[in-house]
Image (tube, helix red, strand yellow):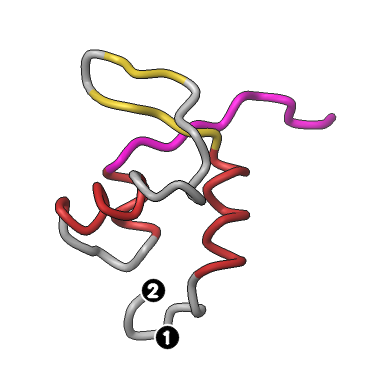
């Protein structure tokens, strides 16, 4: 069976995925023109498609070292 669910990321998940960067740095990154557009702006904040964020990370960020992961 294939998982066809919609996988989303909020700012907190992006922070964690980028190695625990600050909230301010997360905002700076997610505001970049080359960062994927949020698919919704909820009361609790914006959300992005996880596959779009992961694609951006793979293209723009160096892999985390084992101690950072």
- The residue depicted at 15 percent of the width and 53 percent of the height is 24
The range drawn in magenta is 1-11
Q: Is residue 19 above or below residue 27?
A: below
Of residues 4 and 45, the one drawn nearer to the viewer in this rendering: 45
Residue 61 position in % (x across, y down) = 49, 72
Q: Is residue 12 left or right of residue 38?
A: left
Q: Position of residue 54 (x, y in %)?
A: 57, 53
Question: On the image, numbered disc 2 is attached to which residue?
Answer: 69
Q: In percent of the image, x 56 and y 56: which residue is there?
A: 56
Residue 69 magenta? no
Circle 2 packing at 10 Å, graded few (<14), some (14-19), many (20+), is few
In contact (CB < 8 Å): disc 1 and disc 2: yes
Q: CA distance from mark 1 to mark 2?
A: 6 Å
- Please, is residue 50 above or below residue 5 in the view? below
Residue 21: which numbered mark, if any? Answer: none
Q: Position of residue 9 (x, y in %)?
A: 43, 37
Quarter of the image for the N terminus: give it: top right
Q: Going 52% across and 48% down the picture, which residue do you hit?
A: 53
Helix, strand or loop for disc 1: loop
Give the left or right position of residue 69, taking residue 59 as reference. left
In terms of secondary structure, where does tag 2 sit?
loop
Most frequent secondary structure within the magenta stretch: loop
Does residue 8 belong to the magenta stretch?
yes
- Taking the view exactly as shown, the residue that stands out farthest to the top is 43
Q: Which residue lies under the disc numbered 1?
A: 65
On the rendered structure, is 15 left or right of 5?
A: left
Q: Residue furthest right?
A: 1
Q: Quadrant of residue 64?
A: bottom left
């Amino acid at each position: 069976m294939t998982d066809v669910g919609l996988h989303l990321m909020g700012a907190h998940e992006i922070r964690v995925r980028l190695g625990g960067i600050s909230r301010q740095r997360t905002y700076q990154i997610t505001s970049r023109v080359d960062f994927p557009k949020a698919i919704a702006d909820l009361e609790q904040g914006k959300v992005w498609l996880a596959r779009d964020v992961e694609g951006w990370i793979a293209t723009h960020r160096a892999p985390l070292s084992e101690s950072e992961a």
